[in-house]
Image (cartoon, rainbow, N blue to C red):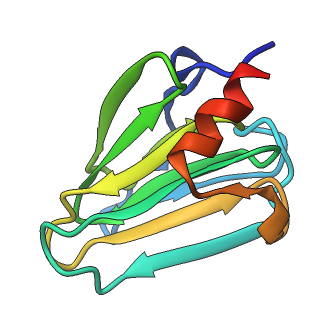
């Protein structure tokens, strides 16, 4: 199956309400379709700044705005869409083979990414022309 932005969806994570504060959680292969091999955070991004600008050949991700908000531009080489993440219990599933850019960070935003694979520089496509060539194969 060729990856498409139409396969990249936002899911609502389990949310436990408590007067002392809310909690959401992610469990390997239960509420996401892969085992998490890597988790990282992006923070202290100046308000309005952009990040990203790459695709992955094999890696899938779930992206959560743990704090604040930002937009994620998704591009499958044919179609594009922008997804706004602004709730800590909403997670965007980004399929492999999708170009992504994160934009419009609000001040104090924290972006948490859960990845299906460990870091591997060979999995990255960080040139858009190479991405289009990869998609046409």
Q: Residue at x 77, y 49 (%)?
A: 59
Rendering quarter of residue 44: bottom left
The answer to whether residue 19 is seen in the rendering is: yes
Q: Quadrant of the C terminus?
A: top right
Q: Residue at x 83, y 43 (%)?
A: 34
Left/right placement of residue 56 relative to residue 9 reads right
The answer to which of 135 and 41 lies nearer the viewer is 135
Q: Quadrant of the N terminus?
A: top right
From the viewer's perspective, is residue 8 above or below residue 96? above
The answer to whether residue 37 is seen in the rendering is: no
From the viewer's perspective, is residue 113 above or below residue 98? below
Percent x, y of residue 50: 28, 64
The answer to which of 111 and 28 lies nearer the viewer is 111
Left/right placement of residue 12 relative to residue 17 reads right
Percent x, y of residue 54: 55, 54
Q: Residue at x 28, y 80 (%)?
A: 45
From the viewer's perspective, is residue 127 above or below residue 121? above
Q: Residue at x 78, y 44 (%)?
A: 57
Percent x, y of residue 133: 67, 32
């Amino acid at each position: 199956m060729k990856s498409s932005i139409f396969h990249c969806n936002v899911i609502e994570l389990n949310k436990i309400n408590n007067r002392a504060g809310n909690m959401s959680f992610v469990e390997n292969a239960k509420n996401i379709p892969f085992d998490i091999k890597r988790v990282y955070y992006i923070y202290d991004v100046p308000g309005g700044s952009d990040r990203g600008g790459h695709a992955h050949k094999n890696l899938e991700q779930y992206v959560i705005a743990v704090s604040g908000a930002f937009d994620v531009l998704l591009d499958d080489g044919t179609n594009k869409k922008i997804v706004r993440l602004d709730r800590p219990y909403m997670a965007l599933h980004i399929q492999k083979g999708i170009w992504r850019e994160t934009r419009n960070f609000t001040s104090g935003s924290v972006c948490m990414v859960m990845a299906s694979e460990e870091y591997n520089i060979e999995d990255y496509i960080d040139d858009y022309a190479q991405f289009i060539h990869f998609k046409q194969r």
